[in-house]
Image: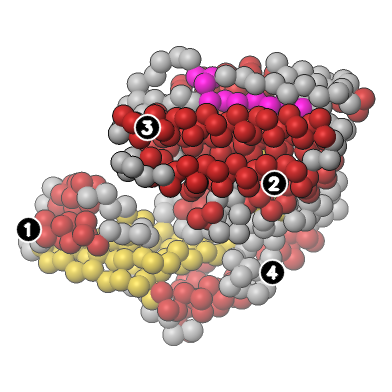
Amino acid sequence: MLEINHATPSPSLQDQSKKPWLVQKFGGTSIGKFVETITGTIVQSYLPTNRVVVVCSARSSESKTLGTTNRLLRAAASAMEPGSVEFKQTVQDIREDHINTARQHISDPLILKRIEDELNQDCNRLLAFLKAVQTIEEISPRSKDIIMAVGERLSCRIVAGMLEDRGVETEFVSLESVIEAVFDVNCLDQNFYDYMSRVFAGVISKCGNRVPVVTGFFGPVPGSLLTSIGRGYTDLAAALIAVGLDAEELQVWKEVDGIFTADPRKVKNARLLNIITPEEASELTYYGSEVIHPFTMEQVIRAQIPIRIKNVMSPMGPGTVIFPDNASGVSTPTGRMTPPPSSKVLLENGYQLDLSRRHPTAVTIKDNVWVLNVHSNRKSVSHGFFAQIFGTLDTHGIAVDLISTSEVHVSMALGANVNEKAMEKAMRQLRSIGTVDVTKDMAILSLVGKQMKNMVGISGRMFSTLAKAGINLEMISQGASEINISCVILERQALQAMNVIHEELLSNVGREAESQYF
């Protein structure tokens, strides 16, 4: 369903057709706390040079429990309880929160009246839907999607109204019902995502010179959006829009300056990285640093579209560019040609940066890790030994982050949030093939860098640095690509380990990058 808000045409937006597309994604916290900066400064600053698409998450606040998405989930749960009226109050709280925000930031009485009417209409529909859920005492995954979609609708209405109030011609675009083709829930492969990017681009292209303000929630997705995609759906929507439009860039606006050589809250000398490769960003995300979901990033990078991480609290900062480093410089499916990674990259502030480096890029820590050891009760490992281990873990939904093996022994670092009961069941089954024990309160320390494969002795330097600091290694793992060297240590030593590694191997990374400007 496509809904349109028509505003008075802005002279500055008259001929947008020749400008390159730019997709800006704003998270819930950014919209909840910095919507004035987004609509008054950030979006408008790019309009002279780009056709801007704004993608919004549902509004959040200081507390995640008070965020719109979590409130909607609680309302859905309440509606399933016979006789409960809690969901009615939750909807009213959501209504008042958004209307008060609109009144605070929109000064034109006509625009404000229309936005208030739209917000009330959305909340009334939500309330009626929840009452129906309570009556039939059933809520399907698709019904939950319908409830959840309201958060993005409300958020986008406010952002569109505020932009219009500031003289920007806007168009509210809902992606809730744009998927018309039928797909098998078990076959959501790349063809499905290519289809979505084409559909999204088609809808947005119809906006003409208006700035599309787009819901991050889209559908209907086979199996439901929450089940099939998860809570990172807004990032994915922005990525698919960028691919479909062959955008110049995808900007992901957060409350941090970008990606650092280490967590700046834990390492005081951590420095901002101006540029990073997709492989490095994926590794950092997986091993503890919140960058952007690897699958979402994959959709953009495969189309050779740069991703820029920017800070809503510091819009003029350079941010961090995740740059598609197509080493061969060949054309991509979109026809875009990308230079090899050794060439210079133009940064937003007009400077250029050399992509070739000869040092690690960042160090990260993943806490709350468990180590599972399985020692075979035979003299050698049979061909079914590994299959039985991983089959058992998969049955109980236990993810493995790292693995280290010998002839008769397997050690595995398990991801955070391991379910204790599931682990107990898995261990009982695994004892049929050997001795099993588990160690808690561990952490994974990962050193990441695309060019580390060209650094002779980097592993030795890393481990000797930890040894000098008195930090014992429980496990060591290094991938064939040598982009990531990881080890498992005691969680209580994680902060110390991160700092000594950063001091020894990364303290000059940011300075070296700065010296490459010319």
> Disc 2 marks which residue?
100
Give the residue type that dot 3 points to: Val
Give the extent of the magenta segment.
Answer: 170-179
Q: Is residue 424 left or right of residue 10?
A: left
Residue 352 or residue 219, whichever sits in front: 219
Give the residue type that dot 2 points to: Asn
Label pair 4/1, CB-CB below 8 angstroms? no
Residue 293 or residue 336, whichever sits in front: 293
Residue 177 or residue 430, whichever sits in front: 177
- Colour mode of the rendering: secondary structure
Asked which secondary structure carries label 1, the reply is loop
> Disc 1 marks which residue?
432
Where residue 369 appears, as percent x and y from the top left, is 36, 65
Q: Residue at x 64, y 34 (%)?
A: 119
> Disc 3 marks which residue?
133
Q: Distance from label 2 to label 4 (Cα)?
A: 48 Å
Q: In the image, is residue 311 part of the stretch drawn in magenta?
A: no
Label pair 1/2, CB-CB below 8 angstroms? no
